[in-house]
Amino acid sequence: MSNIWRYIPLIEASGATHMAVDRFLLEQHRLEKSPPVIRFYTWLPAAISLGYHQKDYPQNWKSLTWQSQPLDMVRRPTGGRAVLHQGDLTYAVIMSIPPGKRLAVYKQICEFLIEGWRSLGVDLDYGTATKEYINHDNCFATATGSDLVTPVGNKVIGSAQLRRGKVV
C-alpha cells in the first residue's frame, strides 16, 4: 500500500451525491490520478442504500418517510444488502487491491476500524458468515465475515467491496 493517502474530511450530503463521489474517487485512483483515499460521511436527507446486486426489497420501502419527507433510495456501487442511513457514519476506502483473497482484503481494510474503536474502549471483531444473510433484505439483520460485531454478536459496522481492475 502507498504511504501517502488523501483524507477527505466529513461531508454531509444526499445518498446520490455520496455514491457519485465514491465512484469518481475509485475511477480517479484506477486511472492513477489520485492516491488512495479514506473518507467519512453522513447522509442528509435520510436514505436507504441498496446493494449493487440486491434485486428485491419490500415494496412498502418506497413509501417510507423520515420527518415527513420520503426516504431517498439509492443503489450503492458495492454489494451487500439494504442499509438505512439516518444518523450513521459511513466510510469509504479507495486503494489498490493488496495481495490476498477477498476476505483477507476486508480484514486489512477494517483493521483501522477495530483499532480506532478499541482506543475508545469498544471491542469489535469479525462476524461469522452464515447462509441466512441472503434471506434478509436488511444488511444489519445478520453479519458476514467482513462485518464487525460486538462481543455478543451485534453487527455495528458493515463493509462491502467494489473491485475495478486493480482497485477496491
Image (cartoon, helix red, strand yellow):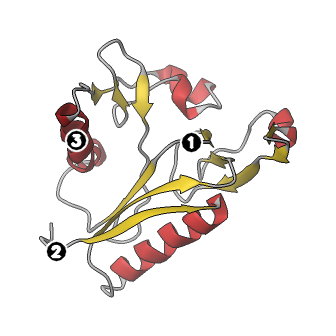
Position in image of residue 19 (x %, y %): 57, 64
**What kind of residue is marked 2?**
Ile
Q: Secondary structure at mark 1?
A: loop
Disc 1: CA contacts within 10 A as few (<14), some (14-19) or many (>=20): few
Asked whether the residues under the numbered discs 2 and 3 touch, taking CB atoms below 8 Å apart as contact, a structural biologist would say no
Disc 3: CA contacts within 10 A as few (<14), some (14-19) or many (>=20): some
**What kind of residue is marked 3?**
Gly
Would you identify the image quadrant in which residue 35 lies?
bottom left
Which tag, 2 or 3, sits closer to the chain's start? Answer: 2
Q: CA distance from mark 3 to mark 1?
A: 19 Å
Specify the quadrant that holds the N terminus: bottom left
Q: Is residue 20 visible?
A: yes
Residue toward you, 93 or 118: 118
Q: Secondary structure at mark 2?
A: loop
Which residue is the extreme one toward the left? Answer: 3
Q: Is residue 115 placed above or below 123 in the rendered structure?
A: below
Q: Secondary structure at mark 3?
A: helix
Which residue is labeled 1 in the image? 87
Query: Which residue is at a point 36% across and 78% down the rendered structure image?
Result: 30
**What kind of residue is marked 1?**
Gly
Query: Which residue is at a point 52% across and 48% down the rendered structure image?
Result: 79
Which tag, 1 or 2, sits closer to the chain's start? Answer: 2
Which residue is labeled 3 in the image? 116
Which residue is labeled 2 in the image? 4
Query: Which residue is at a point 75% across and 52% down the rendered structure image?
Result: 72
Which tag, 3 or 1, sits closer to the chain's start? Answer: 1
Query: Which residue is at a point 30% across and 48% down the rendered structure image?
Result: 102
Disc 2: CA contacts within 10 A as few (<14), some (14-19) or many (>=20): few
Q: Is residue 122 placed above or below 52 in the rendered structure?
A: above
Which residue is the extreme one toward the top? Answer: 152
Asked whether the residues under the numbered discs 3 and 1 touch, taking CB atoms below 8 Å apart as contact, a structural biologist would say no
